[in-house]
Image (tube, rainbow, N blue to C red):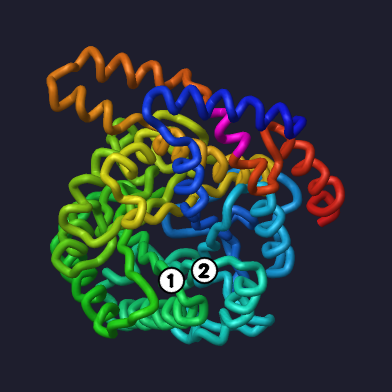
Amino acid sequence: MKEELIEKAYEVAKERYAAIGIDTEEAIAKLQNIQLSLHCWQADDVAGFENQGGDLTGGIQATGNYPGKARNIDELRQDVLKAASMIPGNHRLNLHEIYGDFKGEVVDRDQVEPKHFQSWIDWAKENNMKLDFNSTSFSHPKSGSLSLANPDKGIREFWIEHTKRCRAVAEAMGKAQGDPCIMNLWVHDGSKDITVNRMLYRELLKDSLDRIFEVKYENMKDCVESKVFGIGLESYTVGSNDFYIGYAASRGKIVTLDTGHFHPTESVADKLSSLLLYTPEVMLHVSRPVRWDSDHVTIMNDDTLDLCKEIVRCDALGKVHIGLDYFDASINRIGAYVIGSRATQKCMLLALLEPLKTLREYELNGQGFERLALLEECKSLPWGAVWDEFCLRNGVPVGESFIAEVEKYETEVTSKR
């Protein structure tokens, strides 16, 4: 698309939005400062580099077998940078512990240290990318159905030590990059069938978490993430939403809301205004659940749009962290990165272009018709021209032109793996 056409369309859109009191330049500036945390596990179907082998366990799975997935740390880094080159703005990278640079050495999870991520820290600095982190309780011989909530003291101690060490890694990352590393804690613990020990497992999880969080750090932030159920763990989840909201509110921790971890008709957007009253910040893991937590690639749907609008409506741009969390192995993985990231950014842009001041005046005045009418008319405003301008200014493909670039990379790189 020719630059002059993009700029001409943007000038028209700028005037159209100005007519309803919206400064598109201000919206673009705010969007420029919103960093997504790109999930490393989209590039290799959550395999990691532990050399432990085996399939995914712990209630998660990646479906599909599209050719060309990253097989090692160099290929994964190459793919992440390629994806980032087609996503406007400057973003972060979210690592699971199993993606350490172990250099062929078998390092069990209760032995992981910051040194195993030093090359990631160096790589991120070279590429102007900040890091976030996750402990990894799944896909391990000691995972089973229970980790931090396991009545077996030896297994529970193993996972407590693992998670403590992950916090130390996150602290090292945050200190090195001069910006707090967001460290997410999610465990799959639960039961496939009926349990008669709900309280026991939750008492154990609470005790494990208290021990894990004993050390206070200045360069990382702790998040706790709930789930409704996992594959093979359908009847009971120890770390439910109620459990972690109570824990986070009482301990001053951040709650992670994964859009796939709730009932299909449940609004994750509605949870933000409640959580922000009682917890310091909120972490989001954004995906597209199709029949529960299927981790499809994020698109511009009502759920993601409502979520982004609620962030802006709560004036919470500085309090809500946005991470992506899907792993689609059925399509081109780099393309999946780009589609999901750009879709999330488009939803944020639409939220930033909403005439909130006028809408709130209508609402306070009891003008329900006017409020609904303006909300509807905003849907057809020329936001796409503003998005194209944002992409142009960031030097990334505009419109559908990224498709050819992804295809070229597949022909020249991933198809040869």
Q: Are the residues tagged 2 and 1 within 8 Å (C-beta)?
A: yes
372 in relation to 346, above or below: above
Q: Earlier in the sequence, mark 2 or mark 1?
A: 2
Q: Which residue has dot 2 on it? A: 131
Q: Position of residue 262 (x, y in %)?
A: 31, 42
SS at badge 2? strand
Q: Main secondary structure of the magenta part?
A: helix
Label at residue 395: none
Q: Establish if 156 lies above or below 364.
A: below
Residue nearest the observer in this picture, 80 or 48: 80
Looking at the picture, how far across and down is residue 118, in whole percent?
A: 59, 82
Answer whether residue 217 is magenta in the image: no
Look at the picture and state if 396 lies above or below 43.
above
| Residue occupied by mark 1 | 181
Type of amino acid at the residue the image marks with label 1: Cys
Q: Residues within 10 Å of mark 1 (few under 14, many from 20)?
A: many
Give the image quarter of residue 417.
bottom right
Image: magenta residue range: 383-389
The amino acid on which the numbered mark 2 sits, given as a three-letter code, is: Leu
